[in-house]
Image: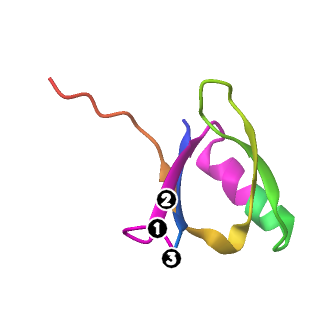
Amino acid sequence: MPTRIVFAAPGVKGGVLTQIFEEEPADVLAAVDGGKGSAFCLTARTRRKEAVYVNPSTIAYWTAYTRHRHE
């Protein structure tokens, strides 16, 4: 299951940005722990599935991502 990460973004209206990543929430935790405060690479869920280096100090929180369908 993909992960939605919410980033603190003080210069943006609302103060946060979100991005969906291909990695499972447990894999994000392992990357944060393994990075020991340094940036780490995740795969952003975009048309091209881009590699993104994430600064852990900007992460507000993350959660499993599920697409909600309105019927």
Count residues near mark 1 (Cα–Cα under 10 Å), then give few for <14, some for 14-19, many for 20+: few
Residue bearing mark 1: 12
Q: How is the image coloured?
A: rainbow
Could you give the CA–CA distance between mark 3 and mark 1, rounded to whole angstroms?
A: 6 Å
Q: Is residue 42 magenta?
A: no
Residue at disc 3, secondary structure: loop
Residue bearing mark 3: 10
64 to 62, vertically: above or below: above
The residue at 46%/66% (across/down) is 16
Q: Amino acid at mark 1?
A: Val
Residue 38 position in % (x across, y down):
85, 69
Q: Amino acid at mark 2?
A: Leu
27 to 16, vertically: above or below: above
Residue 70 position in % (x across, y down):
19, 28
Image quarter (top left, top right, bottom left or bottom right) of the C terminus? top left
View extreme (left): residue: 71
Q: Amino acid at mark 3?
A: Pro
Going from N to C along the chain, the mark reached first, 1 or 2, is 1
The residue at 85%/65% (across/down) is 35
Query: Mark 1–mark 2 contact, CB under 8 Å?
Result: yes
- Left or right of residue 33, residue 15 in this image: left
